[in-house]
Image: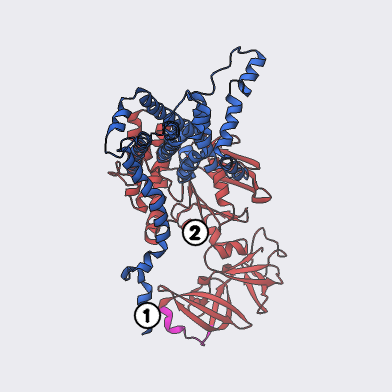
Chain colours: A red, B blue
Amino acid sequence: MSTIDIELHSVSKKFGANRIVKNVNLSIPKGKFVSILGPSGCGKTTTLNMIAGFESPTSGEIRIRGRDQNGVPPEARKIGLVFQNYALFPHMTVAENVGFGLKMQGRSRQEIAAGTKRALKSVRLEGFENRYPKELSGGQQQRVAVARAIAPSPSVLLLDEPLSNLDLKLREAMRVELKEIQQDLGMTFVYVTHDQEEAMAMSDRIIVMQGGVVAQEGAPADIYGRPRTSFVADFIGKSNILPISDVGDAETGNGSLRVLLEAAGVPIMAAPMPGLGPDKARFCCIRPEAVRLADAAGALDEPANLLTGTIQKVVNLGAYLEAWLLVDGGITLKSMIRSTRLDKLVVGRRVELAIAHAAVQLLEE
Amino acid sequence: MAVIALSTSQSPARRDLSVKTFLPLMAPAIVLALFFAVPMGMMIGISFQSRDAGALTLASYSRFVNDGLVLVGFGRTVVMSGLVAVCVTVLAYPLAYYLARSTSRWRTVVLALAIAPELAGVVLRTYGWLIILDDRGFINSALMWVGVISEPLPLSKNLFGVVVGLTHVILPFGVLSLLTSLQGISPNLERSAQILGASRLAVIRHIVLPLSVPGIISSLLVGFTMAASAYATPALLGGAGFKVMATMVYEQVLFYLDWPFAAVMANVLLILMLGVAFVGSRIESRLNQNLHL
């Protein structure tokens, strides 16, 4: 039990007739950075509010550190929470804000002062003790909010889209810092966000939610590399999602499956999908960076699908070029190609494409 | 030409301060001048006149300062208004807090119920209280019938009755001033405090109360000034034994026909209210700075 901080057992939440969270099972391991990722309305904030105790589940059980939290009010759960809009107390100084949790625990003045100092140090905001929140920048307020939440040393810190009010540069810097703070403290972070890049950058584990259910759960690389549904494939990163039919049996030595790209009528080989029956596969996902020009694929030391097509459109993204390729048979594939190969990409030119078998992922729905 | 026409039409107010600009303001200005500024000026003027002729004198003011009965009435007005202000604010606070936080569909019903009494006239509501608080009213009759008391309790014709009546009349205004202030406090602040370990009571004490002090002050101000200027309720529930400034002014004008003295009392009442409002708003703006809102 000690290795799991938070568990949800078939938790559901209804608001009136709306089921916002449907039968969710989760276990969040101690000391990990876990993101709950999903578009707005997927139930991620409601899930967070139930963990925090602001909402109670309609059915199911939430356990924190092994204890059932049914009927336990937020103030008794001993967890930290950082809000999207920081929610700093405007009438208190930075030090008073950060020390509030310790004060509520009835600690002595010295303990509060020491705890406040330690928390401000871990967010690198020393020397701001006597400022008021409105005298701070957005990024500084964010740090105060984090310091305030970690000062009482909760075992779990919940973060509700804490970076979405910051500008892009600051957001990227704070990502790194939050991850560092989490690792320094060894605290469990549960991070709710709709920003898949943020989740990818920081998390040890990502829980993708959609329509109130967990769509997929796993390590970031796993979620990106082996999405199970077209929703996950589409939501995380860029992808080509193509309808398929006629899933055959394993043909080659490495277990690749023969499938038919429906729109083009072109057969290609796809990676085997453990746990997914051939009759269940409806789509396949090919990441744009896996669609390569064939002359470069000579270096590819794994079995690959070879296709021919025409370059339709090229968009320069700086480090990469995004090319729309019309494959013979009538499907369009997006491809990410390094900018050094700009001279090869002339609109209207015929090209040969290589896509590794392993890069073609079969999807359930 | 078109460009020029466009640019002039965009900023007519800044360049053209002609009669046309002020025309729409003329009607309210005239009404205010005729029915507010002029009578106010006249009242100040009358207060310096002697009773019979028109000679300038401070006689009425010196009478005010030396008349023990009048001074008692003045003190009574201050005490009564202060009590009403406190009662209104204390009673309105929980209701305003509920209205500010509730998401229930009953919220609108409660708000309507809180404001609805204003739709019935002051006199009507005061008579209602008279029925309840009178010596032969509901409470006294019931208590005497049960046998708890043998003599009626002094519930009306005194400070208690007037404070009860005025608190009821003014309560909605207290609710509205507190509501504005409480609605400005983000619920996330309370949630933050809660998750940091604060009980409901601690949240109220450390977060909600300090942040709503401006609302508390404005509720106290509204309560005080409305109570100090109220006439019907003190007249009906206070009776002859409980005279406040408003009823005394009325008496001077109608029974003693002493307009200069009535004007003095009205002016003193006005100065009292302006003074309280001034101090209150100073405290409020000071607090707003200290609260860093």
Label 2 neighbour load within 10 Å: few <14, some 14-19, many 20+: some
SS for callout 1: helix
Foreground of the two, A260 or B56 = B56
Residue A345 part of the magenta segment: yes
| Residue B253 place in picture, x, y as percent | 42, 35
Foreground of the two, B100 or A70 = B100
Q: Which mark is residue A314?
A: none
Residue type (three-letter) at the residue carrying disc 2: Asp
Label 1 neighbour load within 10 Å: few <14, some 14-19, many 20+: few
Confirm whether residue A122 shows in the render: no
Foreground of the two, A147 or B91 = B91
B109 left or right, relative to A181: right
Above or below, A39 relative to B79? below
| Residue A187 place in picture, x, y as percent | 45, 42
State which region is magenta. Answer: A340-351
In front of the other: label 1 or label 2?
1
User: Looking at the image, which residue is at 60% across and 13% down?
Assistant: B149
User: Looking at the image, which residue is at 53% across and 68% down?
Assistant: A238
Q: Which mark is residue B5?
A: 1
B202 left or right, relative to B127: left
Above or below, A258 relative to A195? below
Foreground of the two, A80 or B16 = B16
Confirm whether residue A161 shows in the render: yes
Res. B14 image quadrant: bottom left
Alpha carbons under labels 1 and 2: distance apart: 50 Å
Res. B266 image quadrant: top left
| Residue B210 place in picture, x, y as percent | 40, 37
Residue type (three-letter) at the residue carrying disc 1: Ala
| Residue B261 place in picture, x, y as percent | 35, 33
B205 left or right, relative to B65: right
Which quadrant holds the C terminus of chain B? top left
The residue that disc 2 covers is A195
